[in-house]
Image: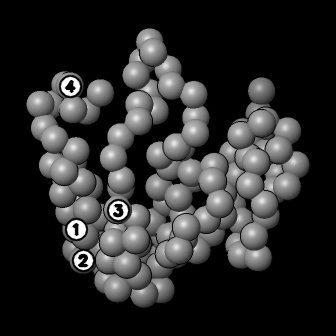
Amino acid sequence: RFREESGLAWEDYLDFLHGQVRELCTNYGEIACIWFDGDWPHHPFDETNQYFKPGGSFEYEKLYGMIHELQPDAYVHNNRHEEPLPGEDVQGFEQDLPGENSTGFNTTTVYDMPVEVCMTIND
């Protein structure tokens, strides 16, 4: 939807995204964590709202490298519902406990790294 509404190319969005992360990492002191809510590459496409429309590469290797260079003590988490990529320091699970896959979208193996669970705890 970004491309259609803004008239900008994917590369323009990437420049904006990487620039915003650089600003966070350089202008606000020490950062403990950068937490992304994922691109969810295998999530069903929602025709009504255009969520999860396939796009280009987020250039994670470059993005994570920049974060680790500018904020060496910060950890990177990306709630992608996929096996962790190089540069991700935490593996995330959505509405599920690691290894249980009761929701159907946490199908990855639990890796030997810290995990984070995003879980609603009320009705």
The quarter of the picture where residue 8 lies is: top left
Disc 1 is placed on an element classified as helix
Q: Is residue 88 left or right of residue 22?
A: right
Residue at image location 40% in from the left, 64% down from the top: 60
Q: Earlier in the sequence, mark 2 or mark 3?
A: 2
Q: Are marks 1 and 2 in contact (CB under 8 Å)?
A: yes
Residue drawn where x is 16% and y is 41% of the image:
9
Amino acid on which the number 4 mark rests in the picture: Glu
- Of label 3 and label 1, which has the lower sequence position? 1
Single out the mark in the foreground, 2 or 3.
Answer: 3
Using the image, determine if residue 72 lies above or below residue 95.
Answer: below
- Which residue is label 3 attached to? 59
Q: CA distance from mark 1 to mark 4?
A: 26 Å
Mark 3–mark 4 CB contact (< 8 Å): no
Q: Are marks 1 and 4 in contact (CB under 8 Å)?
A: no
Name which residue type carries label 3. Answer: Glu
Q: Secondary structure at mark 3?
A: loop
